[in-house]
Amino acid sequence: MISAAVMLFAIIMLCVGYPRYVFMPPTERSISMLCQLGWDSARQTRKGFILVSATFCFLAALIVNVISAFSVDSGSVGNILSYVAAVLVLTGIVDWVYAGQDQSFLDVSKSSIGGAFDDERVEGYKKLVRVLPPGVMLAVFDPIVTVIFIPILDSIVYPLYTKRAGKSPSKFGKTAVGLTVATAGLFWAGIFEVIRRNAGALEDVTAAARSP
């Protein structure tokens, strides 16, 4: 019921804000072109290979996470798969941050030095690499939150509640705690997004360092 009400509210808000949407037709296949550029750089540079490997880690984590969601009744299998998904996501994030901090490895694909891609287009995709992976894709990071919070709740929060209240928490109470944690996470994500948007545009550190 709560999920249905929230979904209905979201649909209403989308309809209300429809006149303010900006519609722009796509000019090229950005994602497929980025994949081609990444694959080309992966065959020539170490950081390109790391970047592509990080992408595959994210995709593998997504698949494992879906499988674990349907394995909750299979004993410890679901928990093991959740740990595997968490490790894959963590590996992908570390690799992407390491490779994406300096995008100069993509220059090997520039046509001016014998590559197969236009120089200006490569520069544009270098900026795109800095802001990827998208935040929504990081939802596969959820298993780590679950793995961390469940032991904390089971070993600290619920026993403390039982000691103070003199009774074990009900299933509804545990559900309420889960919803509270999820709501706090949503608020934090919103606050962080506001801070990020108000931080100003990204500066080209390389260009600034070269300027006198």
Image (cartoon, rainbow, N blue to C red):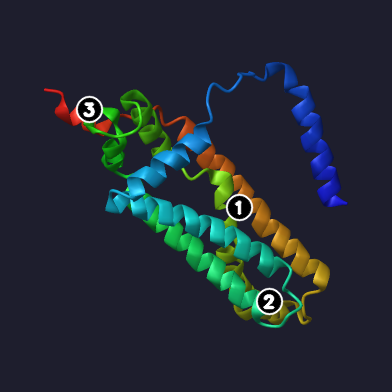
Task: State which tag comes first along the sequence, 1 or 3.
Answer: 1
For the residue marked with disc 2, what is the amino acid? Tyr
In this rendering, position of residue 152 left or right of residue 50: right
Residue 6 position, x and y percent, is 80, 43
In this rendering, the label closer to the viewer, 2 or 1: 1
Residue annotated with mark 2: 158
For the residue marked with disc 3, what is the amino acid? Ala
Residue 59 position, x and y percent, is 55, 56
Distance, label 1 to label 3, CA atoms, is 37 Å
Task: State which tag comes first along the sequence, 2 or 3.
Answer: 2
Residue 181 position, x and y percent, is 65, 59
Distance, label 2 to label 1, CA atoms, is 20 Å
Under circle 3, the secondary element is: helix
Residue annotated with mark 3: 207
**Labels 1 & 3 near each other (Cβ < 8 A):** no
Task: State which tag comes first along the sequence, 2 or 1.
Answer: 2
In this rendering, position of residue 141 left or right of residue 132: right
- x 60%, y 70%: residue: 82
In this rendering, position of residue 171 left or right of residue 21: right
- x 84%, y 39%: residue: 8
Under circle 1, the secondary element is: helix
**The C terminus lies in quadrant:** top left
Under circle 2, the secondary element is: helix
In this rendering, the label closer to the viewer, 1 or 3: 3
Q: Residue at the right extreme?
A: 1
Closer to us: 211 or 70: 70
In this rendering, the label closer to the viewer, 2 or 3: 3
Quadrant housing residue 211: top left
Residue annotated with mark 1: 185
For the residue marked with disc 1, what is the amino acid? Gly
Distance, label 2 to label 3, CA atoms, is 54 Å
- x 73%, y 74%: residue: 72
